[in-house]
Image: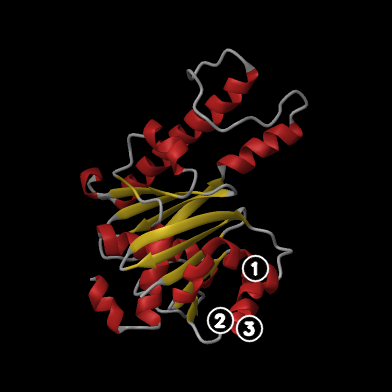
Amino acid sequence: MTLLAADIGNSHTILGLLAGGEVTAHWRVATDERHTADDWVVLLRGLVGDALADVDGIAVCATVPAALHEWREMLARHFADVDSLVVEPGVRTGIPVLTDNPREVGTDRIINALAAVHTYGGPAIVVDFGGTATTYDVVSGQGQYVGGAITPGIEISLEALGRRGAQLRKVELQRPRAVIAKNTVEALQSGMIFGVASQVEGMVARMIAELGADPADVRVVATGYLAGLVIDECSCFTDHAPWLTLQGLELAFARNIHPNEVNRHN
């Protein structure tokens, strides 16, 4: 079967077509809270094209309530004959969430944990590099979601510096020539790339120590559309899974809509 998966984040929405755990096509668009259900369906038809007619199911997770509301309406009006899953509290993932208030944990983070456990087992740490936030999600050796951390994302940090710094401006996100920069543009790039890399390594080291696990046994997985900027500057990552969230959505869809599909993925 062909699944359309949508990861609706604060800055961007990642869309993908999946079949049997493989992402066959993918797109990234800006998340706009003003988009209506009709806007979204026009966008989908323009991006996916004729392949949209072959979609057998749709799975969605979102951190933007306004966008999720419009997606629900779009699914009801335009895809009523297609099986769909909106990941929210109460949806079966098979991942015990050991936090103070499990309903507060972002659905994308639970989906990342599900995909990590399925693909790598535990213990594992998933670092998701989004534009608005960089999230850290920790899975125990027993496959339990035990918590994580949230830091400002690379894009929002750079944007804030450009907006609040009188002599600073927005710059292209790319690796500078050296850590010790010779101009303002490269100084900003150095801070973003190498500064975030050092932050990630420090956070991961602290999390592994707190888990009490042997560092050699912990899989540290980078995902998110900005992971490519940082991953080569970090020594802590064992894996790069750019479509981890989309693959987790496929697993959740199989578990909730077509439970017999779960065995095929295992």
The image's mark for residue 62 is none
The image's mark for residue 77 is 3
The mark that comes first in sequence, 1 or 3, is 1
Quadrant location, the C terminus? bottom left
Q: 64 and 101: which one is in front? A: 64
How would you rate the neighbour count of disc 2 (Cα within 10 Å): few for under 14, some for 14-19, many for 20 or more?
some
Say if 48 sits above or below 211 in the image.
Answer: below
Q: Is residue 258 left or right of residue 102?
A: left
Amino acid type of the residue tagged 1 in the rendering: Val
Amino acid type of the residue tagged 2 in the rendering: Phe
The image's mark for residue 42 is 1
Tally the numbered discs: 3
Amino acid type of the residue tagged 3 in the rendering: Arg
The image's mark for residue 79 is 2
Residue at disc 2, secondary structure = loop
Real-space Cα separation, disc 1 to disc 3, in angstroms: 13 Å
Image point (49%, 75%), residue name: 53
Q: Residue furthest top?
A: 182
Q: Residue furthest right?
A: 166
Q: Residue furthest front?
A: 50
